[in-house]
C-alpha cells in the first residue's frame, strides 16, 4: 500500500482547496454497446468528439497544476479536444481495469455462463482484481496530492469509479455505487480535512 495522504488538503495559488477533476473519455462504439474495453484501442465516435470539445472553453479558463491521462487513444483524444493535451503526461496507472478474458464482452453475455457475475466483487479471469486497480488509483492520488493546484485526470469508467472510492477511503469495491457516463466531469476535493465528492457525473 502507498504512503498515506497528508491529513490536510493542499491548496492552489487561489487559496481554494485542491480538487481532482475526473474526466471519463468520450463515447466509443464499444461503450455504446456495453462491451468491456480495456486494452483494445477504440476511437471516439463523432458524438464522443463533439462532447469532448464542449469541455475546451470550460477548461480554458481553469489553470491546472497537473494534467494526467491514460495512454489509451480514447482518453488522449478526449484530453486533446478538451484543450489540455499540450500540458498532459500520459501515465499507465490511469489505464482501464484489465478485463482479461472478458475483454470485448458485455455483462449480458458473461452472465450467460456466470449468472451472478459482478466485476467489482468477482474480478475477471486472467485480468486484474479490484485491489490491483485500487493500488494504481492510490499511486495517482499520491501524485496528485504532491503538487500544488487542481489536477485533471483523463481516464476510464471503472478506473475512475475505483479511484473515487479510494479517495473517499471506502473499499475499492464500493466503486460500483458510482455510476459514471462517458464524456463527463466529476470533482473530488475536501471539506476542511475530509475528502468529499464535490460534483459527480456532470456535463459541459
Image (cartoon, rainbow, N blue to C red):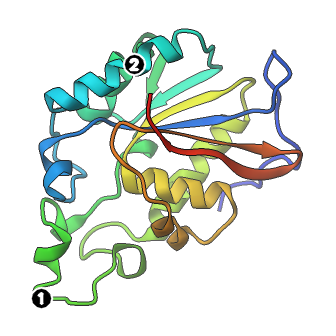
Q: In which quarter of the image is the C terminus?
A: top left
Residue 87 shows in the view? no
For the residue labelled by badge 2, is the local secondary structure a helix, a strand or a loop?
loop
Question: What residue appears at the point 65 percent right and 68 percent down from the top-left corner?
Answer: 170
**At x 62% / y 19%, what residue is drawn?**
64
> As displayed, is residue 3 above or below residue 65?
below
The answer to whether residue 97 is left or right of residue 73 is: right
Q: Classify mark 1: helix, strand or loop.
A: loop
- Where residue 151 appears, x then y in whole percent? 61, 29
Q: In this view, does 103 lie above or below 91?
A: below
Residue hosting label 1 = 113
Residue 178 visible in rendering? yes
Please tell me which residue lies in front, 41 or 52: 52
Residue 187 on image: x %, y %: 60, 40
Q: Distance between the residues labelled 1 and 2?
A: 40 Å
User: Which labelled disc corresponds to residue 167?
Assistant: none
| Residue drawn at point x = 77 percent, y = 49 percent | 5
Q: Quadrant of the N terminus?
A: bottom right
Q: Earlier in the sequence, mark 1 or mark 2?
A: 2
Up/down of 123 relative to 3, above or below: below
- The residue that mark 2 highlights is 82
Amino acid at each position: 500500500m502507498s504512503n498515506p495522504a497528508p491529513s490536510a488538503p493542499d491548496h492552489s495559488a487561489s487559496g481554494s482547496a485542491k480538487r481532482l477533476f475526473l474526466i471519463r473519455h468520450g463515447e466509443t462504439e464499444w461503450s455504446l454497446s456495453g462491451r468491456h474495453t480495456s486494452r483494445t484501442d477504440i476511437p471516439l465516435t463523432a458524438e464522443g468528439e463533439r462532447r469532448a470539445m464542449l469541455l475546451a472553453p470550460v477548461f480554458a479558463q481553469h489553470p491546472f497544476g497537473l494534467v494526467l491521462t491514460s495512454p489509451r487513444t480514447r482518453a488522449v483524444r478526449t484530453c486533446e479536444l478538451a484543450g489540455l493535451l499540450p500540458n498532459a503526461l500520459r501515465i499507465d496507472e490511469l489505464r482501464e481495469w484489465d478485463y482479461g478474458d472478458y475483454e470485448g464482452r458485455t455483462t449480458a453475455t458473461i452472465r450467460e455462463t456466470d449468472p451472478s457475475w459482478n466485476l467489482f466483487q468477482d474480478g475477471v479471469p486472467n485480468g486484474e482484481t479490484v485491489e490491483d486497480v485500487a493500488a494504481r488509483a492510490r499511486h495517482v492520488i499520491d501524485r496528485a496530492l504532491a503538487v500544488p493546484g487542481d489536477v485533471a485526470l483523463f481516464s476510464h469508467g471503472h478506473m475512475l469509479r475505483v479511484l473515487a472510492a479510494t479517495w473517499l477511503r471506502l473499499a475499492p469495491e464500493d466503486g460500483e455505487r458510482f455510476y459514471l457516463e462517458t464524456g463527463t466531469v466529476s470533482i473530488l476535493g475536501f471539506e476542511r480535512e475530509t475528502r468529499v465528492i464535490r460534483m459527480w457525473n456532470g456535463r459541459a
